[in-house]
Amino acid sequence: MTKYSLLIGGTRVDTSAYADVRNPSTGEVVGQMPLAIQGDLDRAVAAAKTAFREWSRTSEEERKAACLAIAERIAANDEELARLLTLEQGKPMGGLGSRFEIGGAIAWTQHTAELSLPVEILQDNGDGRVELHRKPIGVVGSITPWNWPVMIACWHIIPAIRTGNTVVIKPSPLTPLSTIRLVEIINEVLPAGVVNVVTGDDSIGAALSAHPGVAKMTFTGSTETGKKVMASAVATLKRLTLELGGNDAGIVLPDADPARIAEGLFWGAFINNGQTCAALKRLYVHDSIYEAVCQALSDYAAKIPVGDGLDETSVLGPVQNEIQFNKVRELVDDARARGGRILTGGAPMDRPGYFYPVTLVADVADGVRLVDDEQFGPALPIIRYTDIDEVIARANANPAGLGGSVWSADPQRARHYALQLECGSVWINKHGAIQPNAPFGGVKQSGIGVEFGAEGLKEFTTIQTVLI
Ligand code: NAD
């Protein structure tokens, strides 16, 4: 059984204790995760701090070249990374699964490498000259979730190092191995200590977010944990980027064509088995086409094979872990008990592993937990509405504000309503289609700050104005 190591200051570090990481399709052990203790974390932060002295002084060109070289190294190891990701996360190799995720990690790394934040001249006249410089912050602590671990690790690490910071990353204990391997690959390119990885249970995440040597935290995970990270930041006034939970609404206007939008709705909701921050989690459909949309979605769902991620015919895999599996089961059972009509799925699959089928639940309304809570799994509530202004208000009543979508034959009409949604990203006739040049982040309780593009890069800098 492969025992993985921490990577601190460019050196593999063993720990005194390890934990098994299991494949959610089979329950088999994939590898062993090192359990870091406070001393390991202190050494990782110290290594990142030492590396910061040199790395923060490297030129834009050097850092761009390093990021492009990292993209090349990831690409050279793509199949190995994809397989490890499937083994620990569960997602299929093909489709919108592991190869897609590694491809995304490469694409984001390349795009971010090419970005830059040149000095801005705010004033240059007889009264003087004012320059705005963007400087790296210091050691960045990164904490990632288990749903898209490799891609999200790149969303944290690459903009941080591109702007001259150094990093200590702590992946989810449920999917740590692909991140360890990613950091090993990144260390083939970078000087020792620029990117370090520590793994362990949630307490090591809490220790990282409270660490006095960390100048900024970038966190992706649940809103509940994000609030704890924010509280930990107080003592040293750490800078924060928080990408938190969502409960994205999709609103189908009466002029939409159910057959044409079914595929987009399906993948908006069920990408990665619904375990995606900006997945469509509440679908509001106008009464006049409600049954037609339910039918079109059910027809599409019937064509999707669910199975072990290593089986190349699988299009969706298992739910990643037991807690999430039980949550989906409970929310669907509750919705059924409260009058929900199960169109497809509705009970765990009869096989080992955390397999729950694609589940569509009609005739539910706001106030039912499956609608109000973030299900983060393969179960979509479909809610009927008649009045568009009222449904916008219902969509906005949720404390989350990550993404949203409007579906219509008339994109301008859709845009009119899209602008009324309280969320960081809104899509028209698609959902969750993030791209590296479009800043992405949540409003309300879905987070603070954005990732991607120049706006995302700025989050890893502090401003220094020079007044001459
Ligand atoms: P989680 O909050 O349980 O865990 C996220 C990470 O935080 C893990 O690495 C965990 O070990 C760590 N952690 C746990 N307790 C901690 C503490 N007290 N202090 C510091 N770190 C701690 O989230 P999850 O279940 O891994 O991920 C699912 C959630 O992430 C969903 O809510 C989803 O919407 C959200 N998410 C958001 C985005 C986004 O970009 N907005 C992207 C992906 C996932």
Image: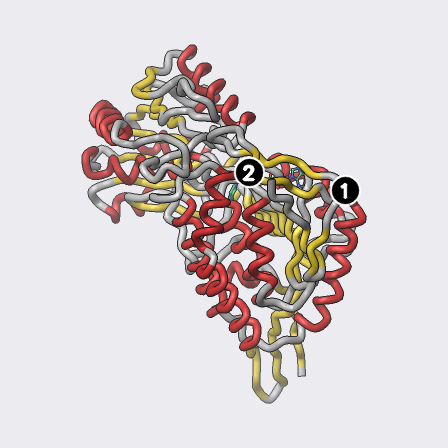
Residue at position x 21%, y 33% in the image = 258
User: Within 10 Å of the Cα at label 1, are there few (<14), some (14-19), or many (20+) other Cα atoms?
Assistant: few
Q: Secondary structure at mark 2?
A: strand
Q: Nearer the viewer, residue 141 or 92?
A: 92
How far apart are labels 1 and 2 at the CA level? 19 Å
Amino acid under label 2? Val
Check the picture and name the quadrant holding the N terminus.
top right
* Residue annotated with mark 2: 30
Residue 275 x %, y %: 46, 36
Residue 397 x %, y %: 47, 31
Check the picture and name the quadrant holding the C terminus.
bottom right
> Which of the 4 quarters of the picture holds residue 159?
bottom right
* Residue annotated with mark 1: 16
Q: Secondary structure at mark 1?
A: loop
Q: Residue furthest bottom?
A: 126
- Some atom of ligand 1 lies within 8 Å of the CB belonging to the residue at label 1: no
- Please give the label number shown on residue 341: none
Q: Is residue 395 above or below residue 81?
A: above
> Which of the 4 quarters of the picture holds residue 345?
top left
> Which of the 4 quarters of the picture holds residue 253?
top left
Residue 220 x %, y %: 57, 45
Residue at position x 55%, y 46% in the image = 243
Q: Is residue 84 visible?
A: yes
Q: Nearer the viewer, residue 50 or 265?
A: 50
